[in-house]
Every structure is written in C-alpha cells, then in structure tokens.
Amino acid sequence: MVLCYNIAMKLDRFDVIIIGGGAAGLFLTSQLPPTISVAMIECGERVGKKLLATGNGKCNLTNLDIAPERYNEPSIIENFLNRFSAKDAITAFQKMGLITKSIDGRVYPYSECASSVLDVLRRACDRDGVQIFTSHFVNSVEKKDGLFSVSGTFSRVDKSGNSEKSARFDKSSRAGNEKFKFTAENVVLATGSPATFGKDSTGLYAAFGHSVRQMAPSLVPIKTDKAAIKGLQGVRVKAGVRLGDSYEVGEVLFKDFGVSGIAAFNISGELARGRAKVGDTLTIDFMPEYSLAEVEKLLCERDNGSTVSTLLMGTFHSRIQERIICAAGCEPTDKAEGRISALAKAIKSYKLTVEGLGDASLAQVMSGGMNVREFDENLMSKKVGGAYAIGEALDIDGECGGYNLQWAWSSAKAVAVAIANKCKTQNCK
C-alpha cells in the first residue's frame, strides 16, 4: 500500500476523496470498483489505529442478532441493515480472506486479533488508483464548478519514515507543515468521533449548512458517587442496571470513579442522548433472575437464626456483601431476623447517584454527529450533491456488541454502491 507524505505526485484529482482512514473509510475503499480512483486522507500516522482497539483488541465485527431497536435511530437504520446485513458483512470479509467465528452471537476474526481485520482491509485497498495520505490534516472542503476541493496541511516524512522533527532535509526544504489540495467529483466524510483517540471533523461540512448534535461519550463508564462504591474497585458481577426507563443485564465492572462493563456501557447512552442527567439515580440489581418477593423468600429459607453477614455468605463477593449490608442499614453482626426485607431491597435496587459520563478516551463510540435526516437513502447530502457521510460522522450509535461496526460496514456499502452507479453513468475517469 502506498503511503504518501508529500504532494510531489502526478495525481491530485480523483473520483472520490475519503476523509478518514478508520473502519468505515477502509471498508468503503475496499468495496469501490477498481476503475474508480480514490484518495484516502488520514490525519494519523497510520490507518485503522482505532480499529485495533475495538473489542479489547479482538474486534467484534458484527452481531448475528443485529436489530434496528439496538440503535438510537431504529426507523432510519433498518433500511441500511436490510440492504447490507450482518451476514452480508461476514461474507464480504470472507471474500477478503478473513475467517470468522461466532461467540454468543458476536462475530470475531478467528484469530480474535483486530490486526487480522485491518490486514485484510489494507490488502483489499491495495490496488492501482488508491492512494492513502497519512499525517494529512484536512482544514476545509469546498465545492465549485462541480468539483470538491479538499485542502489542508501534512507533516513531512523522509524516505526512512522519520518525521520532520528528527529527519535531516536539504537547505531548500521549507520548515513546518506543507499544504495540499486535492479535487474530486465526490467526497466522503468518514472521520469517526473523538472516542478513544479519534477526531470529530463534522465541522468540515458546516459550510454546506449541515446541523450537528454535539458529540458526547457513549458506550463509556459512568461516573457515580464514590461512597456507594467504596472498596469495590476491580470487582466484576453480572447484574441488572437501570437508569431512567432503560434497563440492561450484563457484566458490571466497578471502578474507583463509577461503573463500567457492558451493562453500564449500554446504559450510558441515556446520558449521552439527554434522556438521563447528572443527579439521577442509577440502580443495580445484584440478583436479576429473581423478583423482590423471590429474593425475600430465598433469604427467609436460608435464615436459621444467623447473622446478616452469615446469611449473605456464599451468595455475593465479600465486598459486594459489605456494601449491601451497609445500604440496608445493618451491621454484619446483626441478627438476620427482621432485616430480610431491607436486605432484599438493597440487593434488588442498590442505588448510585450519577455524576456524569466517563472521558471520551474511555469511550468506544460517541453519541452525536451530523443529522442523518439531512442525507438521502444513499447517505448523500441533501444540501450539496456528491458529498457523503458514513459511520460515526452521522448521528447514529448502537449498543455494545458489534452494532457500531456493523453501522460502519452498512453505511459504507450504501455509499460504495451509490458512487459506483454514479461513476458508471457519468463515466468517471
């Protein structure tokens, strides 16, 4: 694959310019016909860096149980999932050479290494007509006389791959970043979001009049009051988590600042989308398989004149047990008789006060982005023809478990088909 670091090249006009070298941008490039010339512009030193961190490095590609209601805009995303489903995504990656496997419905590369996914995507993009420009920062996107101009700056790199700061250049070399300007009939914004170490570049389409909902961390730990989680750092449990009208059952991982884990991640969207707020109560159900009445009955059957501590022993992690006893207003040495109702309520509804969302560096995705209703069924702007957007650049986000990568694949495929048909009709160069 050609990684270009300067503008001393023969080609500066393309059929398509893709801004962003993440999952969506790479997949889009892999799905475009070889007759279409492509420039991919990535601000980082390499493409796909964020992809390597997905699924704790395993890359949860998609989910066999993908459903529209798992997203914030189910009525909109249903059309894209019908056109390019999870099975279609698996087939596409298999054609690229990736072997996959399913674990509880979640689809991973057989190697369980995200690098395997990036490898096949890079290889699929490695063809004539595709040029990838890393360390290139786009500052503006304009359209004039039917052509888009994409301009910005890039960091110079010598042939050994060293950055300008450490490389030695001849005296004629200019100091600082160089400028670039490419043109194309089509431009695609695939810049993702600030989640992990990404970047929000939705402002590039501001000149076209697109509205943007400010991005907030989603699929991220939730900050809570410290007193209620004292001593629980590192403890994992399977529990139910409720915030507002939303309820999730799954792993909860306690942090020193709040709660993490799949259940907490999925519930964090309530805060990101403004349906819950700081100061609200988050409740944890430590026995989600049982009703409150069933928990009380179970405790009563176990009670043989024991203490509160003995009654709960063997059911919960010792530190969870301590917090339950405290929340019930008991002491470990208290007799269980007369305390069972309070203990059952603490088990079924352990209360935490929400203090906010975790930092974007801890988030898997961000909630927010450009209003998807301002784009057509092929994700082309309704305000300016030839400008497309895919993936996290649009205000679409889903639950944890492969849903957001599936949106990257489905949205990219829709644009690939649209551009291919357009170029075929217009005989793109």
Image (cartoon, rainbow, N blue to C red):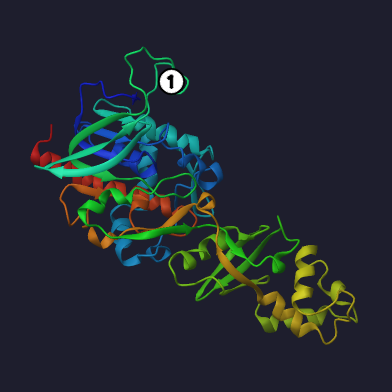
Measuring from the top left, give residue 265's x and y in whole percent. Answer: 54, 60
Residue at x 36% of width, y 23% of height: 175
Quarter holding residue 198:
top left
Q: Is residue 74 above or below residue 202?
A: below
Q: Position of residue 69 (x, y in %)?
A: 40, 66
Q: Amino acid at mark 1?
A: Gly
Q: Can residue 397 be seen in the rendering of this structure? A: no
Residue 420 image point, x, y percent: 19, 41
Quarter of the view holding residue 369: bottom left
Q: Residues within 10 Å of mark 1 (few under 14, many from 20)?
A: few
- Of residues 72 and 88, which is closer to you in this image? 72
Residue that extends furthest to the top in the rendered view of this protein: 170
Kindly indicate the quadrant of the structure image that contains residue 56.
top right
> For mark 1, what is the residue?
161
Q: Tag 1, which secondary structure?
A: loop
- Name which residue lies at 84% across and 75% down: 311
Q: Is residue 156 above or below residue 103?
A: above
Look at 23% across and 38% down and name the residue there. 150
Position of residue 381 measured from the top left corner of the image (x, y, whole percent): 20, 54
Q: Report the quarter where the C terminus lies.
A: top left
- In the picture provided, is 50 more to the left or to the right than 38? right
- Compared to residue 29, the image places residue 253 above or below, namely below
